[in-house]
Image: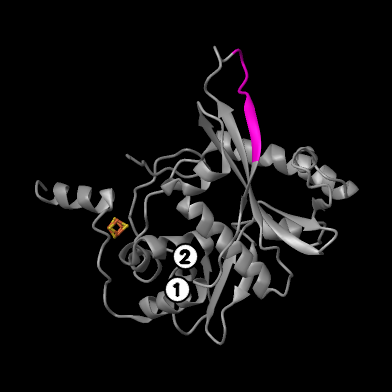
Amino acid sequence: MISINRNNKGILVEAKGKRVMKSSLYSKDNIFEISRSKFNDFLLCKRCFYLDRVLGVKVPDMPGWTLNSTVDELLKKEFDICRKNQVPHRIMIQSNLINIVPFDHPEMDKWRDALRGGIKYKYRDTNIIIKGGVDDVWFNVDTEELIIVDYKSQASFSKVTTEDYLSNVFHESYKIQMDIYSFLFKMNGFKVSDISYFYVANCRKDLKGFNSKLVFDEILVPYKPRTHWIEDKIDEMIDVLNSKKLPPFNPFCQNCACSKARAEYE
Ligand code: SF4
């Protein structure tokens, strides 16, 4: 993808390919925050993670997913009304989850702010803080457990089923995301349900036309988060951060393959 560098006024700015903010770079002497998405980068390719967090090589920005984030924003508004009134949302009623309401907590807005806040956990006696911005948290009034929820919007011809959704290889990172959020809430002392939900808004592609609107089906996909693997991977990530050696690249990555192919001609 061609990514042209502009500032927030749309003016072209020479791309340097390097991070300028010192706080973005790892130092073993300072507290360092790792977001859920950077941790996922580490899981995908240690080399890219190291180049970014330790050496300051900036990966190209991605364009915003405006339709997806609009669905998220509108859902947030709906759930906040239910949160204020402590009543179940329509998807909970449709799914026969009438003992569940959106969780009302003073930190809710902070937990949902992936850029400036998120839920955080300082990992053992290290200088590493793991953090992540959740879409929503619900509350089971019977068991007093928190339920982690992630909104996902997509488009397909066929109806979404739990089995297909969870077995889709492209949804592996979604499950990892849910695992990490569950881990973070648990480590913050909350009682967390062993069931979380993907709130899937599936835009219907089988309709005859657009007619100025997109039509969505909604389904809750239950998922059992697994948190047992996370601490070993955080330990591995810290070893990589403290290493002086550039880790190997991921041989399945199209970006590296593209860079190598280009280097043959430049
Ligand atoms: S293989 Fe190369 S481009 Fe791809 S993620 Fe790793 S370092 Fe980055």
Q: Residue furthest left?
A: 265
- Left or right of residue 264: residue 98: right
Q: Residue at x 43, y 42 (%)?
A: 6
Dot 1 and dot 2 residues touching (CB under 8 Å): yes
> Where does ligand 1 appear, by image quarter?
bottom left
Q: Which residue is drawn at 26% across and 77% down?
A: 245
| Badge 1 amino acid | Lys
In front here: 188 or 96? 96
Q: Can residue 3 be seen in this view?
A: yes
N-term-proximal mark, 1 vs 2: 2
Mark 2 Cα-neighbour bin, 10 Å: few <14, some 14–19, many ≥20: many
Q: Can residue 31 be seen in this view?
A: no
Magenta stretch, residue numbers: 211-219
| Badge 2 amino acid | Phe
Which residue carries the number 1 mark? Answer: 233
3 falls in the magenta region: no
